Amino acid sequence: MRRISADVVIALLLLVICAVFFAETFAYQRVYLSIIGAKLWPRVVVAVLGMLAAVYLYQSFRAGAGERDTPWSLKAWIEENRNVIACFALYGLFLVTLPWLGMLLGGILFVFATLAAIGHNDLKSHLVHAAIAVVSIGLMWSVFTFALGVVLPEGVILPR
């Protein structure tokens, strides 16, 4: 008998969460004189996430359970999930420093540090990571600040 892998369980859990979120959009009230209802964008996002979870489930079934030859150990698990742990730690550091650095500087540093942590470790790659961080966060910050009028955290270093 084939064991169910953790990926299958997580994919099924993600599909259930997406279904619950999609069902919750039916409780949104209609906004008076709105062209597009308040439920459109949440449904689009949840539908895309649901499709990605379905693809994840399909790939998990195809991959199988993947039996281990060696017993489980914390050291091996940390080494296997080093990138994931580093990304979560960097995100936590980003959230902690957000009041001081603000969204613009903190976002640029977070994206650069994340790309540097999971990418190659040479000068050319670091220059590409810096360019990606500055352009992506700069564009996102500009769109939210100027086009959408969203007040993003400013920080102490670069107040508006």
Image (cartoon, helix red, strand yellow):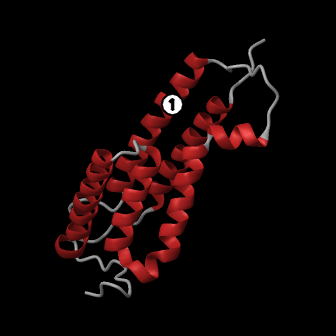
* Residue sticking out furthest to the left: 147
Image location of residue 71, percent across then percent down: 82, 28
Q: Secondary structure at mark 1?
A: helix
- Which quadrant holds the C terminus? bottom left
Q: Which residue is mark 1?
A: 56
Q: What kind of residue is marked 1?
A: Tyr
Q: Does residue 34 show up?
A: no
Q: Residue at x 41, y 51 (%)?
A: 116
Q: Crowding at label 1, few (<14), some or many (≥20) Cα neighbours within 10 Å?
A: some
Measured along the vertical axis of the image, is residue 137 above or below residue 17?
below
Q: 53 or 139: nearer the eye?
A: 139
**Where is residue 157 drawn, in percent x and y?**
35, 85
Residue drawn 39% across the image and 78% down it = 101
Residue furthest out toward the front: 123
> 63 or 21: which is nearer to us?
63
Name of the residue lying farthest toward the right: 71
Q: Is residue 25 above or below residue 160?
A: above
Please state which of residues 121 and 135 is positioned toward the viewer in this rendering. Answer: 121
Please state the horizontal and vertical placement of residue 59, each as a whole percent of the image: 52, 23
159 sits to left or right of 65: left
